[in-house]
Amino acid sequence: MYLQRRNRILRQSPAIRSLVAETILTPNDFIVPLFIDEGTNIKLEIPSMPGYYRQSLDNTVKEVKELWSMGLKSVLLFIKCKDELKDNRGTEALNPQGLMQRSIRAIKDACPEMLVMTDVALDPFSSYGHDGIVEGTEIVNDATVEVLANMSASHAQAGADFVAPSDMMDGRISAIRSALEENGFTKTGIMSYSAKYASCFYGPFRDALDSAPGFGDKKTYQMDYANRTEAIKETLMDVQEGADIVMVKPALAYLDIIREVKNSVDIPVSAYNISGEYAMIKAAAKMGWLNEEKAILETLTSIKRAGADLIATYFAKDAVRLIS
């Protein structure tokens, strides 16, 4: 049998496969989400996210130092606000001595070169668990955007390198950029959750921060998972308004959106490999239905192959160990 072309030649050994691999994972690809709680010496495993923890700030600082030693260079901070500090306007989010602001300062003091990104949304601070101010049963847009802009300036004042608005309110990127500029934070970047879908896969994350909505759902501001063109519209608007990095969230059920966004913009694209995606692999591995390590690498490679320049993932430490 004579063949002019034998494609299997480039697959016949690990060395050849490595040489011609089109997509390579490195520690530089990953953003590490961190959940921070009040108190000291706290490390609580999240039941729906086995192997992942909500930690007090002292333990978080230790974790950040370990991440840096592993070659991981970016963290994304989420805080758990005490119930008694929550209200309808997210007042605690603007507290210069709030947990988020203290966490930013502590991490930058302990590990100055670590890139610190911060979640900007009202749901951790809201008595309603929504990403915006509630009037009746409506999550109002413009009043929320004003708070988000002030929150972003507060994070920048504390030392954040990037603010990451995850709320999906209209016009918030423009307002945040204006607030940063007006307050002299011209070096603070914006990583916008530009195409954030209303997804069932967020459940474990809401367990981690006790931030599930107290009524209704988030479908009036997060996107309909049936839509594709809308994601490009939202993303292009964020770029025009001043976003430095755009994000697609979730990742695995939205690989086509990641590719569409990558093809449409000329700035870095990030994707969030979210809590439900993490929990699925953990649960299947626990049952013996798949190999966890292989699933981690295949999943993260698929997200990068789809077009993500950066991947926020709870598997970051595991992935670094595996690829090293």
Image: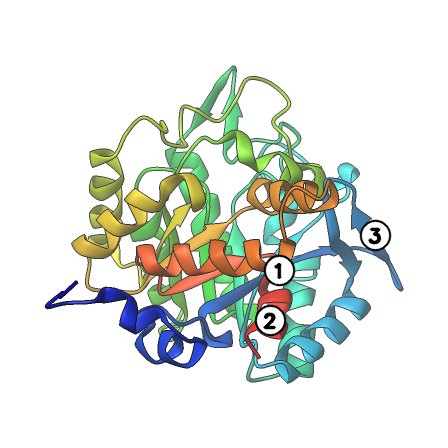
Q: Mark 1 highlights which residue?
A: 293
Which quarter of the image is occupied by the C terminus?
Answer: bottom right
110 left or right of 27 in image:
right
Q: Give the crowd class for mark 1: few <14, some 14-19, many >=20 residues within 10 Å.
A: some
Q: Mark 3 highlights which residue?
A: 44
Residue 98 visible (yes or no): no
- Viewer-nearest residue: 193 or 133: 193
204 left or right of 199 in image:
right
- Indicate the position of residue 90 as horizontal and vertical percent values: 60, 41
- Relative to residue 187, is residue 2 depicted above or below? above
Q: Mark 2 highlights which residue?
A: 322
201 left or right of 2 in image:
right
Amino acid type assigned to the residue bearing label 3 in the image: Leu
Residue 243 visible (yes or no): yes
Which callout, 3 or 2, points to the residue nearer the camera?
2
In the picture as drawn, the residue positioned furthest to the right comes out as: 41
Q: Are marks 2 and 1 in contact (CB under 8 Å)?
A: yes
185 left or right of 113 in image:
left
- Label 3, label 2: how many angstroms apart (C-alpha)? 25 Å
- Indicate the position of residue 198 as horizontal and vertical percent values: 45, 30
- Indicate the position of residue 124 as horizontal and vertical percent values: 63, 42
- Viewer-nearest residue: 234 or 98: 234
- Relative to residue 68, is residue 311 depicted above or below? above
- Label 3, label 1: how many angstroms apart (C-alpha)? 24 Å
- Relative to residue 205, is residue 323 depicted above or below? below
Q: Are marks 3 and 1 in contact (CB under 8 Å)?
A: no
What is the image's colouring?
Answer: rainbow
Which element type, helix, strand or loop, lies under badge 3? strand
Which callout, 3 or 1, points to the residue nearer the camera?
1
